[in-house]
Image: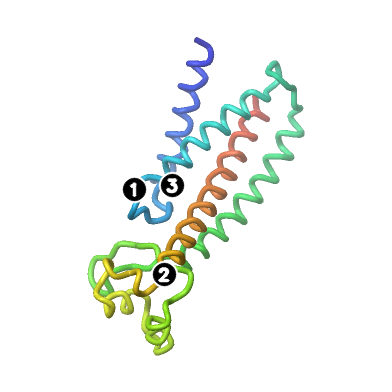
Amino acid sequence: MRNTALVRRGIETVTFLFAAFSGFLKNVAPPDEIHPGFATGTASFAVLALLLFVSSLRPGGAKSIRRGRWLTVGMLLLATSLASSVIYTVILERYTFAYPPEGIRSTYVRGAGYTSAAARLASEGLAPSAIVAKFGGLQNRELVWSPESLQRARAILLVSYLTMVLAIAAAVFCFLEARS
């Protein structure tokens, strides 16, 4: 029963983290056109596993770590979370675009490098959304960026998002354990 209560507490904590601050962590997730909810779902499970791991290190558990160590690790993770948040913002801007060019828009993943035909349009100063429109819309995105380029961009977005979320969660968990 103790493990069930611990998992329940963990799920409640993870749910709170993803709902806190107007759902910030969920709202900044990379676009998931192919697998909706994959990034936030993966992050949620990883955060739960991290919480359970950190909880197992508390005094009286498998190992005993002093308060000062929790605070030191928490500060390092806080710095990591701030740095990874800035990096993620840059990556999110680099590998996404809004479409359509006018009106109500959604965000989509764009590739790391244009195809040769699309590169010519980009060199003329056209925005990614305008280039996609010239190639016939979202269904023809692979004419603007290669499938490999789009896949690489999705992977980069996912890894950078997970790094940011796990660093934030780990810092929070370390500070909570330091107070225990």
Q: Position of residue 142 (x, y in %)?
A: 35, 69
In this view, which residue lies farthest toward the top? Answer: 1
The x and y percentages for residue 15 are 42, 34
Q: Is residue 79 above or below residue 179?
A: below
Residue 166 location in percent, x, y?
Answer: 56, 43
**Mark 3, mark 2: which one is toward the viewer?**
2
Quarter holding the C terminus? top right
Q: In percent of the image, x 49 and y 56: which residue is there? A: 155
Label ID, residue 172: none
In the rendered image, the vertical position of residue 57 relative to residue 90, given as above or below: above
Find residue 160 and report its image quarter.
bottom right
Residue under label 1, please give it: 36
Point 31% across, 78% down: residue:
130
Q: Mark 2 highlights which residue? A: 146
Disc 3 crowd, CA 10 A, few/some/many (<14, 14-19, 20+)? some
Residue 122 against residue 4 in the figure, above or below: below
Front in this rendered view, residue 174 or 95 = 95
Name the residue tied to disc 3: 39
